[in-house]
Image (spheres, rainbow, N blue to C red):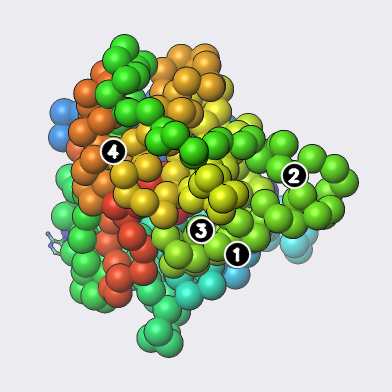
Amino acid sequence: MSVAARAAARVDELTYRPVRTDEIEACAGIWWTAINDYVVRLGQDEIPPEMNPIIRLFTHLQSTDPERFIVATQPAAAGAAGDGDADADAAAERVVAFASAISRERLWYLSMLFVLPELQGAGVGRQLLARVLPGDDGTARATATDSAQPVSNGIYASYGIAPRMPLLNLSGLPDRPEAFGALPSGIVPVAFDTIAAGPPGGPGHRKLVAAVDALDRELLGAGHPMDHRFLRTERRWGWLYHGPDGTPLGYGYAGEAGRLGPVAARDEALVAPILGHLVSVVVPRGAFATWIGGAADRALVAALGAGFRLDRFPVLLCWDRPFADFSRYLPISPGLL
Ligand SMILES: CC(C)(COP(=O)(O)OP(=O)(O)OC[C@H]1O[C@@H](n2cnc3c(N)ncnc32)[C@H](O)[C@@H]1OP(=O)(O)O)[C@@H](O)C(=O)NCCC(=O)NCCS
């Protein structure tokens, strides 16, 4: 039997169902294996086996959208279990592929789709996608792909989710932070913790959530308070930027792990100075790293001028209908806008 015929035969035996929380680690392993399988062939470095951040992200995705985190499993190998012990049978199942999508108001976002190399090209990716894609109900459908990966670019574009904008990964330490430009006078950064001081759910907290939600609806096209809560557990700290009359004009995050973003700004000209403020108030353990869309060209030029460098091939943000203004919004990561 040919390799393709063997893959097709195994694909016929797959079961599709929502992930169990004890399978999230296996999904992280598939993510790692599937990426390294093609990046190494392209002569790029393997992605490092640091699984904890991706496991935390998957745990968050599953917690907010459990019915949109779907695995494909192979049945237990003959004789592996099958003694009537349901737990043992389930444990013997092998996860071979998974998809994870999230729904945020009128935005649907495919965060992950990965198939083990030996089962690729046999229709598993399409099967998973069909199980998580919403109907055409006016929701914007979006995802991020690797520009070096024709399969994923082709599969999503066939649903109208076409590559629209490069998303560039920059990292480094700002040797020339003045390239970001200073915040205009009258723009005051206030730490989220200062605004939300007081009891959880109290007036300060509600005011902060309302301000961030309003910015997200205007700039990302959807509010996503659950993702902001996740950022906090990831120890990314937020600042709100108030105008002279106290109106919130933007927000930005940075954490000691070096992650910069998301950043949202009502005025495109504020994105770079917000980055400049963030790198001045947070000392990273290593280097900073951030994701900047091609539409945020002023922030991109500023980050390069400050000393950041580009990493790897760009990611491509894909969507079927416009939903965000990426000249004024820098996403969390390609896995979570
Ligand atoms: C991308 C991935 C999830 C797709 O899953 P898969 O099971 O291999 O894909 P399928 O067999 O269901 O479908 C592949 C589709 O890709 C499309 N495709 C493949 N190569 C293509 C090309 N060069 N140009 C255009 N479309 C292409 C085809 O439309 C094909 O569908 P069809 O056979 O129905 O026409 C899987 O290959 C994978 O995990 N790859 C490595 C990791 C990865 O790149 N993940 C996505 C990160 S952005």
Mark 1: few/some/many CA within 10 Å (<14, 14-19, 20+): some
- Residue 215 numbered mark, or none: 3
In this view, the residue in front, 54 or 3, is 54
Q: Amino acid at mark 4?
A: Ala
Question: Mark 3 or 1 closer to N-term?
Answer: 1
Q: Position of residue 164 (x, y in %)?
A: 20, 60
- Say what secondary structure mark 1 lies in: loop
Identify whether 21 is placed above or below 126.
above
Structural distance between the alpha carbons of marks 2 and 1: 27 Å
Instruction: List the residue tagged with mark 4.
Output: 299
Q: Disc 2 or 4, which lies upstream in sequence?
A: 2
* Nearest-to-viewer mark from 1 and 4: 4
Residue 61 lies, in percent from the top left, at 57, 55
Between the residue at mark 3 and the residue at mark 1, the CA separation in whole angstroms equals 23 Å
Image: 39 above or below 141 = above
Cα–Cα span, label 2 and label 4? 28 Å
Question: Of discs 2 and 1, which sits in the foreground?
Answer: 2
Residue 179 point in image, percent of width and height: 27, 24
Instruction: Identify residue for label 1.
Output: 65
Does 248 sit above or below residue 99? above
The mark that comes first in sequence, 4 or 3, is 3
Indicate the quadrant of ligand 1 in the picture.
Answer: bottom left
| Residue at disc 4, secondary structure | helix
- How far apart are labels 3 and 2 at the CA level? 17 Å
| Residue located at (53% from left, 21% from top) | 282
* Disc 3 residue type (three-letter): Leu
Which residue is rendered at x = 16% and y = 55% of the image? 150
Marks 2 and 4: CB-CB under 8 Å? no
Q: In this orientation, which residue lies closer to the viewer: 202 or 83?
A: 202
| Mark closer to the chain start, 2 or 1 | 1
Residue with the mark numbered 2: 196
